[in-house]
Image (cartoon, grey):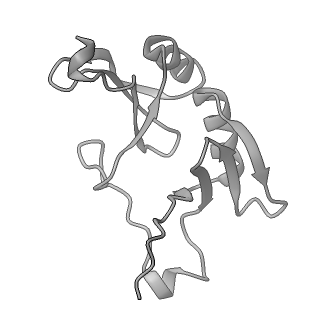
Amino acid sequence: MASNVKPVLGYAIFYVKDVAKSVDFYAKAFGYNVRRLDESHRWGELESGQTTIAFTPKHQHETDELTGEVQVPKSDVHRPPMELCFIYSDVDAAFKRAVENGAVAVREPEDKKDWGQRVGYVRDIDGMLVRMGSYVKSPKED
């Protein structure tokens, strides 16, 4: 008999060059609290509500042979087939904070009337594209 238990998204895991630097960068640039950085600096976590943002090295002998090596986009015109979006009540202030703390501005925040969200883009210290957005407005809020 199938269970009616729904899964919970537990982790969004970033494969990075330097776990400690990435944890510090995300805490400062995006405003997250550090939950954990292990002594080996091979695993770090940020508090972000129900889903934990985690960091681990790009290459791991434990998993590279099992699941394959992490593939990094070859340039800024290529991106992975997923996107991370952090939601803020004040996207402009959050965007400014991110850039002041080392994020690379890609697109300043702008209103997206098609879906009712204010959105800006930055790149992190590993070149990962991060969307910074407001909550999407429902059609009734217009």
Give the vertical position of 13 relative to 126 (above or below): below
Q: x%, y% of residue 61? A: 60, 81
Q: x%, y% of residue 65? A: 49, 87
Is residue 14 visible in the rendered structure shown here? no
Residue in the image at 53% along x and 40% along y: 125
- Relative to 140, 135 lies left or right: right
**Quadrant, the N terminus:** bottom left
Q: Could you say which quadrant of the image residue 54 lies in?
A: bottom right
Q: x%, y% of residue 99? A: 51, 21
Residues 11 and 94: in front is 11
Report the residue that reaches farthest toward the right: 39
Report the residue that reaches farthest toward the left: 114
Report the residue that reaches farthest toward the front: 1
Is residue 77 visible in the rendered structure shown here? yes
- Relative to 36, 30 lies left or right: left
Q: x%, y% of residue 23? A: 67, 44
Residue in the image at 61% along x and 41% along y: 48
**Quadrant, the C terminus:** top left
Residues 136 and 67: in front is 136
